[in-house]
Amino acid sequence: MYPMARDEQIKLRWEAIVSLLSKQFADGEPLDLDAIIYLIGLQELGQLHRKFKKDEKINLMHIAICRLLEPFGYYEFDYFDDEGWPHYKILEQLPPLKAGEQSVLMKEAIVLYFLEKKVID
């Protein structure tokens, strides 16, 4: 038996994450990439029991993207502000990516995040 191709492993882990989070947060309705990024932003902020305004929701997604791309060397955590929001500084601009490539990068980053948090293996 050959070891599983890296892309195939990421795909299977991604499907496991979508399944797990969809059961937990959406009554089994499959969550899309943006919804999962939003949940990661909530997790990173840690202020789970409050309502967020539209601009704050966008900021939550930004937090998640920074945190997810930190291991790839694009961002570095900088500080928490007075309200507990994390701030990141850009270390390297993301290369221009097509939409499909962006999606693949984010899915890979999310898989890494959930492996690191020991939610999946």
Image: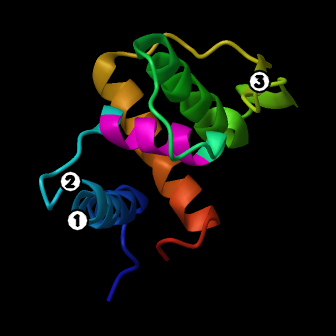
Q: Position of residue 33 (x, y in %)?
A: 31, 38
Q: Nearer the viewer, residue 116 or 87?
A: 87
Magenta range is 35-43
The mark lying in front, picked from 3 and 2, is 2
Residue located beneath label 2 in the image: 26
Vertical arrangement, residue 46 with respect to residue 16, above or below: above
Q: Nearer the viewer, residue 6 or 27?
A: 27
Q: Nearer the viewer, residue 85 or 108?
A: 85
Quadrant of the image for the N terminus? bottom left
* Residue type of the residue flagged with mark 2: Ala
Vertical arrangement, residue 61 with respect to residue 114, above or below: above
- Residue 87: image quadrant is top right
41 within the magenta span: yes
Q: Secondary structure at mark 1?
A: helix
Say which mark, if any, is on residue 23: 1
Q: Does 100 sit left or right of 68 as displayed?
A: left
Q: Does 25 sit left or right of 120 as displayed?
A: left
- Residue 38: image quadrant is top left
| Residue at (36, 55) in percent of width and height | 7
| Residue at (74, 17) in percent of width and height | 92
Vertical arrangement, residue 52 with respect to residue 92, above or below: below
Cα–Cα gap, marks 2 and 1:
6 Å
| Residue at (20, 53) in percent of width and height | 26
* Count of marks placed on residues: 3
Say whether marks 2 and 1 touch (CB < 8 Å).
Answer: yes
* Residue type of the residue flagged with mark 1: Lys
Residue located beneath label 3 in the image: 87
Q: Bin the neighbour count of mark 2 within 10 Å (Cα to Cα): few under 14, some 14-19, many 20 and up.
A: few
Say which mark, if any, is on residue 105: none
